[in-house]
Amino acid sequence: MFNEEIYQRLLEEFGKEKMATVCDIIATLYDIKYMAINHLDALSEFDYERNWWMDKHRELVNLKEIKE
């Protein structure tokens, strides 16, 4: 399952209001994994996942700020 599909299912579960927080939590999870890992193959995956979810978090926060 790809991140966008996961995002859409989480959106259905938690709603738009909570998704910026959900994305921030997931990005933090991958950041923790990235910082703790010492196996180089996994580094790029955790880095990618962390960045994808952080970018989605920023996108949601920016949309929220524009609407306010």
Image (tube, grey):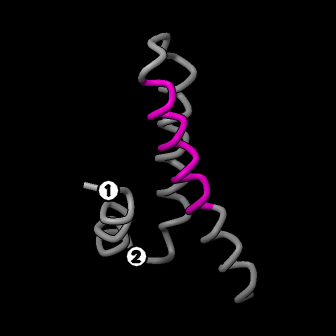
* Crowd band around label 2 with a 10 angstrom C-alpha radius: few (<14), some (14–19), many (20+): few
Q: Is residue 55 magenta?
A: yes
Relative to 11, say whether 53 is above or below: above
Residue 63 location in percent, x, y? 66, 79
Question: How many numbered markers are drawn?
Answer: 2
Chief secondary structure of the magenta portion: helix
Instruction: Identify the mark at residue 2; answer none if there is no mark.
Output: 1
At label 1, the amino acid type is Phe
Q: What whole-number distance in Å separates the C-alpha atoms at marks 2 and 1?
A: 19 Å
Q: Residue furthest bottom?
A: 67
* Of pointers 2 and 1, the one earlier in the residue sequence: 1
Q: Residue at x 54, y 35 (%)?
A: 47
Q: Nearer the viewer, residue 32 or 45?
A: 45
- Judged left or right of residue 40, residue 13 is left
Q: Quadrant of residue 1?
A: bottom left
Relative to 40, say whether 28 is above or below: below
Local SS, label 1: loop
Instruction: Identify the mark at residue 15; answer none if there is no mark.
Output: 2
At label 2, the amino acid type is Gly
Q: Which range is magenta?
A: 42-57
